[in-house]
Amino acid sequence: MPKLSAHDAALALLAAALIFVVLFWRLGTPTFWDPDEAHYAETTHEMIATGDWAAPFYNEQPFFDKPVLFHQLQATAMQLVSDPEAGARLVPALAALGLVAITVWFAVVLLSAEVAIVAGLILMACPGLFGLARYAILDTLFTMFMFGGAACLAVAVLRDRPRLQWVGYVAIALGVQVKGPIALVLCGLTMLILMACSADLRRRLLGLRWVLGLVIIAAVSAPWFIYMYVRFKDGFVNGYVLDENVRLFAGSRFGNQPGYGFYVQILAAALLPWTGLLVGRLVDDVRALRRGEQLDAVEIVLWGWTLAIVGFFTLSTFKLDHYVFPAAPALCVLTARAWSDVRADERTSRHRAARVGFQAIGPILIILGLGCGYFLLERLGLSRGALMVPVTLTLVGGVIVAGMFLRRSRPPRVPWLVTVAMLTTYVGLILFVLPTLERQKVIPEMAAWVATRAQAADRIASFRLNRWTPDYRFYVGRHATFLDDMDEAEAFFKDPRPFYCLMRRSAYDEFVAKGTPLRILYEREGMGATSGRALWRTAAPLVRFVVVSNGQ
């Protein structure tokens, strides 16, 4: 067995540290964040409790938000792991690890081992993956299946390995089972973009067995949709097909939505501090096209995939930051390729903008470090131990900038310093930021207080908890009535049967002023919604919450 070189051993150690810290360290320590984590976890918990693994329910009502596969996998993990938060987050964490492995494989097969290693490190260390891999929602699983399927199809056409297309079709079908037909829409849109951009890709893509592939996708994914229609009839059509897909994309159900540049900003932040390098790659490619040069097929595939995802969700009337996460692995490969090209060819004009982007990494780290240091010292109520983050970012940025002044601006084979700086940042976030936020989250503790005192016949309710409602439902552990209308709430309170209701103190005062007989059983102060403002040393936006019952 060949002995590992010092370089390979150090690389393996760095990768292991990233995997441990980014994906698994203290995974179950925070209670669920509002509102999505608890919503998904409660749906999965009810699946376990009822034994109905075919249809998702939330608060004992059909939940038509997404298909069932994520909940089935999450339920399996929650049954294997005793800690509910760790179990609920295990599937996203493992899916993120699988996504990194797929990205590395894709880059190895189509580009080089050097690009693959850098792409894997960039993806593992990017803020977007850190956030979603530790968040109990389906986006990392969806991205793993989606990008995995697309990667298999790309390798099938670009390396003449047609058998891989069957793996790709199955992966896309699993993506449909995670998030619905949007998987087919994004893959189909990517295919149209690629065929429009390259005659060679058009010929190769049309050479795949698309008809049989669609049959496979339908055979794997359609039975659940047919079952749900047969079981719930028009309720499923209206709740899932229309509300959660057509109207969500084209309707105007939600106001104050961000503008067309929203996802560009999200991706720029999610890829820090490599954003400048990626922008440089884009500028270089555009300049090459203007000179009449042809981009290679891999480059077109990566940009086409990104354009399809960002373009589609930009046109949607409803936007959430994590919707464009499937673009992240392709952008990380593009960034890694730019890193490798700048390293291999320092002076050619073809990579001029990418060189500028590489040179911006050091200043970006310094700016991030100084900004974090200022807020930590002047504004944030965090332990002084958190200074490890701004100090590391600033020092690493300074070392990189100093290397440029010494005319040693050629990128190393592996981005050691940048990766270590990001790793240190995540250690600081887990050690100092997340516990500070956790201390301000009182809804899970108040829900548990209600759960230990309420009798079987007592009614459980909440009034206008808004984003905290799913947390309350999960931690109270039983059916709850969600009250939003004042008249509806007063009718609920007038019923002589005993109840426990969680609300803001301001709402309680309003009810009492109107003569509603309520009494406070328990009161706490905490965050009204999860927000970075809870970290401020002064003027934290805390809210008083109360558990109330019958006034008698």
Image: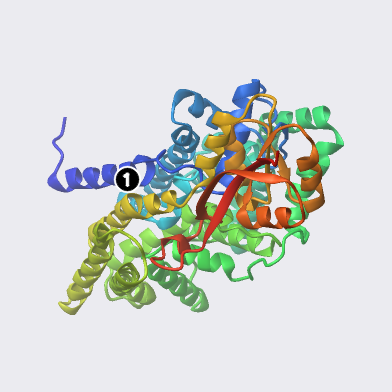
* Residue 174 seen in this snapshot: no
Residue at position x 46%, y 23% from top? 80
In the displayed orientation, state which residue is furthest to the right. Answer: 234
Query: Does residue 100 sit above or below 360 in this rendering?
Result: above
Residue at position x 51%, y 74% from top? 289
> Percent x, y for residue 185?
68, 50
Residue at position x 52%, y 26% from top? 76
Query: Does residue 394 sit above or below 190 in this rendering?
Result: below
Identify the residue position indicated by label 1 in the image.
Answer: 21
Residue at position x 39%, y 71% from top? 276
- Say which amino acid is labelled 1: Val
As helix, strand or loop, the secondary structure at mark 1 comes to helix
- Tell which of 411 and 285 is nearer to you: 411
> Percent x, y for residue 327?
52, 56
- Tell which of 137 and 314 is nearer to you: 137
In the displayed orientation, state which residue is furthest to the front. Answer: 552
* Crowd class of label 1 (few under 14; some 14 to 19; many from 20; radius 10 Å): some
> Percent x, y for residue 182?
67, 48
> Percent x, y for residue 186?
64, 51
